[in-house]
Image: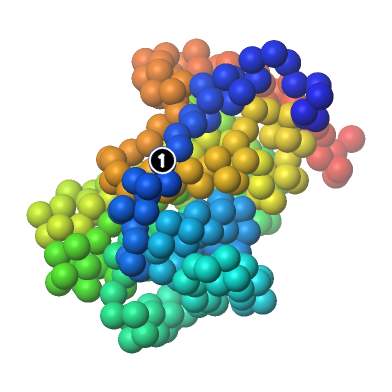
Amino acid sequence: METGKRPIGWPLLVALTNGRTRIPDDRLAAAVRDKVVLVTGSSYGIGEATAKRLARAGATVLLVARTADQLEIVAEEIRAAGGKAFAYPANLAEPAAIEAMVAKVLAEHGHVDVLVSNAGKSIRRSVADSYQRFHDIERTNSVNYLGPAKLVLELLPSMRERRSGHIVNVSTAGVRTPPLARWSAYLASKGAFDVWLRCVAQEIRDDGVTASTVYMGLVHTRMSEPTPLLNQMPGLSPAQAADMVCTAVADRPNNITPPLVRPADALGNLFRVPTDLLFRQYFRRTNRPRKDEP
């Protein structure tokens, strides 16, 4: 939706549906100055914006993503602005690549103070269009669940040994709201890592390692761009989303959740049958015949 066509009260609607949190620069600097922060998915979007703000606050930022060239561009921009950034290209869908990357990071920096697990893969596709696409489920799980879990497992030993560390999971509000048709592969994979990390957090807290989850609302990025409906909905910019992630890095809350998600979560469970019926009707109205159908 173009800025000139947005209705009165649009910023309030964005804040209610997606949340808005901005940590003051001085408080962020006090929390991350001279800390080593590893940010996955930092070549574009939320990850890039988060890395740049953390670097401005004095953190040493380790950039992780698949695209080596783009990572180096981001790193150069951070260094040109006076920050410290190092690029570590790695495909998080490959366990061996994660092991090699973490070994190199620990060898060169000694430790990681904060892990921002931001990398993700989104797929919006109906089950009827997925019969021959089991790889959709494999790919979303590799990037959204298995890869992040492997990365945490690789970094946890050094964090627990030092009795210091923080993990930020950039999740989606969709795992806290009633399930929505077409998003099965994506939401299931994000939900899996969410539950896994919450379980792990109970075991590592006494060792000085904490975890926060940001249940991120809609953010207008390259990931959401292919879905026309999302482009018309109220959403955050990458910089606004980065503010929420940086708040989780500095304040270490259990979670950051948009205002309307909590009641939606509660009502969705309380009224599960009518909620499923409502969304089923929505799917029927918006479903288009497949190309191989008459």
Q: Please state which of residues 142 and 57 is positioned toward the viewer in this rendering.
A: 57
User: Residue drawn 61% across and 23% down?
Assistant: 11
Residue occupying the point 40% across, 64% down = 59
Q: Is residue 112 left or right of residue 131?
A: left
Q: Residue furthest right?
A: 294
In this view, 134 is above or below 234: below
Task: Give the residue drawn at x 33%, y 86%.
Answer: 107
In this rendering, the answer to whether 273 lies above or below 53 is above
Check disc 1: other Cα within 10 Å, few if <14, some if 14-19, many if 20+. Answer: some
Quarter holding residue 204: bottom left
Q: Is residue 10 visible in the rendered structure shown here?
A: yes
- As rendered, which of 147 and 44 lies closer to the eye? 44
- Observer-nearest of 276 and 203: 203
What is the x, y in percent for residue 81? Answer: 57, 65
In the image, taking residue 155 as reference, residue 294 lies left or right, namely right
Amino acid at dot 1: Ile
Please tell me which residue is depicted at 66% across the width and 41% down the height of the picture: 220
Report the coloring of the rendering.
Answer: rainbow
Image coords of residue 222 (percent x, y) = 69, 51
Residue 13 image point, x, y percent: 59, 20
Q: What residue is pinned by disc 1? A: 23
Circle 1 SS class: loop
Asked whether, in this view, residue 143 is left or right of residue 230, the answer is: left
Query: What x and y, as percent, mark residue 80?
Result: 60, 71
Q: In the image, is residue 280 above or below residue 227?
A: above
Looking at the figure, which quarter contains the N terminus?
top right
